[in-house]
Image: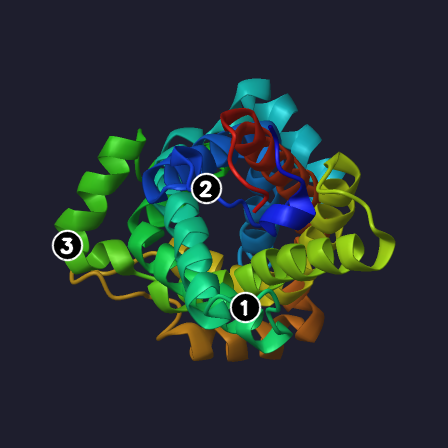
Amino acid sequence: MQQTAAATGRTEMRPVKYHYADSFWCTYLVSVFAASIAETVTYPLDLTKTRLQIQGEAAATAVDAEGALKYRGMFATATGIIREEGALKLWQGITPALYRHLVYSGVRIVTYDALRKKLRNGKETFSLWQSALSGVGAGALAQWLASPADLVKVHVQMEGKRRAMGLEPRVHSAAHAFREIVSRGGVFGLWKGSVPNVQRAALVNLGDLTTYDTVKHFIMHKTGLPDCHVVHIMSSICAGLVAATMGTPADVVKTRIMNQPTDSSGRGLLYKGSIDCLQQTIGKEGFFALYKGFLPVWIRMAPWSLTFWLSFEQIRASLGASGY
């Protein structure tokens, strides 16, 4: 005879019995798989965003005959890539991006979950500051570990533009980019730009994980809706907007530092560090240059967040896990 939820004390979010789908490794693998789906679907927007962010610092060389920037906006950049390099180039760099999620997405989800359980300490309530602390910590740790793959991805993404401008290609593949980075800066060269990268990830996950978790449970508590797709969609849309707003400035700095040329010792030739890059960007291009590429970041983060969370929650539900 089945017991009622009231008798067992079970709620939709807190299952009574442990299930393998709630385990560390299952949660890790499901998050990696869901992130890979989201990354593949939205990757062209990531490539467009990266090109836009580099555009300002390359203004002296990337100009047309009339003295105007060759690419001005998201749509013009995307169509220019298709016209000059081919449609498949919109997925240039997808391999290291997927490698990155093998580490990044798995670590950020399981770390956030572990911190959330630790801070909650068996209680049903989870305050905003606790969620924010968990999101920042999970994002920073995950990005630091995945920073080498992110650096390789940025190098590969920019090769199409260099070739279109008639410049000598720096790398020919993800493996070649990896070898070149190590040969120039050693193993530690793989973490070039890791400081702004970690800062960005901390802010993005403060926006994504914290917003999704907080909004989801707020909606369920205030409306009485079950843990369903409608709740997931509303929560992920909010998460994508907040994450894009908080993370774009750090993303611009991160991309420029990672893409800058280096000397034989692996030191950057354009910027001394993230603060110097921030100062130069604002000084030469104005404050709003920090939001260069915001539209594709937001347009990408909205469907990325939606695709990730829907896939993540659906896969977990099909395996019998509790709501996240």
Splitting the image into 4 quarters, where does residue 18 fall? top left
**Which residue is denoted by mark 1 in the rendering?**
123
Q: Earlier in the sequence, mark 3 or mark 1?
A: 1
Label 1 environment density (alpha carbons within 10 Å; few <14, some 14–19, many ≥20)? few
**Which residue is denoted by mark 3 in the rendering?**
187
Q: Residue at x 34, y 53 (%)?
A: 147
Label 3 environment density (alpha carbons within 10 Å; few <14, some 14–19, many ≥20)? some
Q: Is residue 304 visible?
A: yes
* Residue 299 as seen in the image, left or right of residue 190: right
In the image, residue 195 sits, relative to residue 228, either above or below, namely below
Q: Residue at x 64, y 48 (%)?
A: 7
Q: Tell me which amino acid carries mark 3.
A: Val
Distance Cα–Cα, label 2 vs label 1:
17 Å
Residue closest to the far right: 223
Distance Cα–Cα, label 3 vs label 2:
45 Å
Splitting the image into 4 quarters, where does residue 12 fall? top right
Q: Earlier in the sequence, mark 3 or mark 2?
A: 2
Percent x, y of residue 293: 66, 53
**Camera-side residue of 120 and 150:** 120
Q: Residue at x 30, y 61 (%)?
A: 192
Determine whether the residue tagged by mark 1 lies in a helix, strand or loop.
loop
Percent x, y of residue 291: 67, 63
**Which residue is denoted by mark 2 in the rendering?**
17
**Camera-side residue of 100 and 216:** 216
